[in-house]
Image: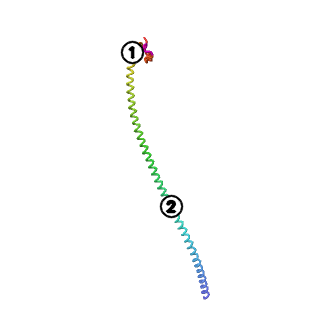
Amino acid sequence: MGDLRAAVKQEHNERMEECQKISERLSAETGHLTKFTEELAATQNSRFTGLASNLATETQDRIDSHNALGSSLLNEAARIRDELDQLAKELAEYKQAMDSDYSRTKTSTEDIIKDLAWITNHLRGVGAISDAFKDFHWASMKHSASTTAGSPLDSMRSFSTSP
């Protein structure tokens, strides 16, 4: 039994030495693993911090861009509104001028029509007088023509009728 005990003890001691070596290797690897884990965490924290900073910068840039675009659109809308107001004012002035011009044109046209009616009535009267006196001989003109040579009545002689 002594040999069995010695064999078990030897086996136990070998196992203990092996466990001790495994423990030492694990301790050494744990240090490396801890160091690697810390480096990885630092790298990730650095990357996440950079990404968070980039995201914050991009967010602020987009907000600024959005605000600038909104301001630009408001300015453009105000400019267009002012142009439309100016065009409406000019159109109202044009309409007023056209209405005034139409009123004057209408009054002038009515006056011309009245004048033409008056001229027509008088021309009818002149035509009637002309018809009444077409065979009339202007003896006084013939008599005065012989006494006043070169008078303005000479030009009217072509209008006298002969017997």
Is 146 included in the stretch rendered in magenta? yes
Q: What residue appears at the point 38 percent right and 22 percent down from the top-left corner?
A: 122
In magenta, the rendered stretch is: 145-149
Residue count near mark 2 (Cα–Cα under 10 Å), binned few <14, some 14–19, many ≥20:
few
Asked if residue 136 shows in the view, the reply is no
Say which residue label 2 marks.
57
Q: What x and y, as percent, mark residue 112?
A: 39, 28
Say which residue label 1 marks.
133
Quadrant assignment, res 146: top left
Q: Main secondary structure of the magenta part?
A: helix
Work out whether 88 lies above or below 9: above
Work out whether 146 lies above or below 36: above
Query: Given the current orientation, which residue lies at the most extreme top position?
Result: 163
Circle 2: element type: helix
Q: Nearer the viewer, residue 117 or 74?
A: 117
Quarter of the figure that contains the C terminus: top left
Three-letter amino acid code of the residue under disc 2: Thr
Disc 1 versus disc 2: distance between alpha carbons? 110 Å
Q: What x and y, as percent, mark residue 136?
A: 40, 13
Residue 63 — which label? none
